[in-house]
Image: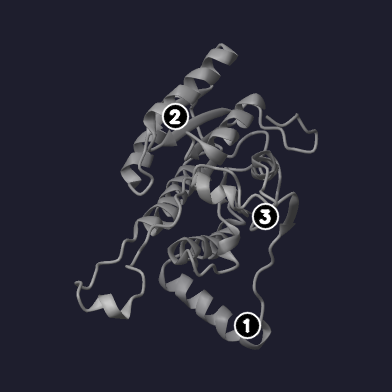
Amino acid sequence: MMAASTALPVISGDVAFVTGAASGFGLALSQELVSRGASVIMVDINEDGCKKAAAEMNEKTGKTVAVAAKVDTACFEDQLAAYEVGKKTFGRVDYFFANAGIGERLWLPPFDPVAASSRPIAKPDMTTLDVNLNGQLNTAALAFQVFERQEPNPRSKFRGKLIITASITGFWACKGVAMYSASKAGIVHFMRSTAGYYADKGITVNLVAPNITATPIFPTDLMALLTDNPCPIELVVEQMISVLGSCKDNGRAITVSGKEVWDYPPHEYMFEENKAAFERMETEYGRQLGLWE
């Protein structure tokens, strides 16, 4: 666990909802949040791992600082039910971490013109999108509606904050992981869009996009081949915590590669030439959807 840093915001007494909390970033994040005085609703498809981690934190602190629930993030109802349990225990949720994710699943059979005619045309496997994109959108949908229904935190003055775990493949397409890249690219644009919409509503939306990190999402044998400069989990967690509390940052794509950290800028190529038409489209779509007058 990383040492306390005066540079990070004060979060003591706050409450977080963390998906994928049984291992990897989610577990390390939950432990760090609790060490800083926050409480955590830990959710994961791995119920035993999640409950074990929560029980250990409760025992260590001598009070209930964590509750755990089995959740398939691709199922909105699962996430809603877990939130309701957490709300009964802690009263409110200040932070939602859309963190749960999986690695690439083979979405189509490998390209083979010789063998293709001997097999039926296959339905694509969209599991990676279901978890990495739709699952995170479910977390976001829950977060925004919860924030809308609660008053701002008296200390931070924010209704709530959404933090999304993305990946460098959201910026740099990787031909070996098409569905993974698609899910992360989608979530990057979702973050930028919603950060703009909620900016004046007491809500912030940011994401952290790590490079290769030693978490269960990577098979052990693959990780052994990618040990040149992995991201320290502690550094990634630190970036997640950096935008909490009274921090006003919004719309950031915080990128971590090895021990380097930077904000990945929006892609602006040819934007000025198309800005007027784009902004008209943006305004009229929002008006038709009832998002603004």
Q: In this rendering, does residue 62 appear at all?
A: yes
Say few, some or many: other residues with alpha carbon within 10 Å of mark 3 (under 14 / 14 to 19 / 20 or more): many
Q: Nearer the viewer, mark 2 or mark 3?
A: 2
Instruction: Name the disc covering residue 275, or none.
Output: 1
The answer to whether residue 88 is left or right of residue 256 is: left
Please, what is the three-letter code of the amino acid marked with disc 1? Lys
Please tell me whether mark 3 sits on a helix, a strand or a loop: strand
Please tell me whether mark 1 sits on a helix, a strand or a loop: helix
Out of 12 and 25, give the one closest to the viewer.
25
Residue 221, percent from left and from top: 51, 47
Say few, some or many: other residues with alpha carbon within 10 Å of mark 1 (under 14 / 14 to 19 / 20 or more): few
* Residue tagged 3: 254
For the N terminus, the quadrant is: top right
Q: Seen from this angle, which residue lies furthest top?
A: 62
Residue 241, percent from left and from top: 66, 40
* Residue tagged 2: 50
The answer to whether residue 117 is left or right of residue 236 is: left
Quadrant of the rendered structure where residue 117 is?
Answer: bottom left
Quadrant of the rendered structure where residue 65 is?
Answer: top right
Out of 288 and 72, give the one closest to the viewer.
72
Please, what is the three-letter code of the amino acid marked with disc 3? Ile
Q: Going 33% across and 67% down the picture, which residue do you hit?
A: 108
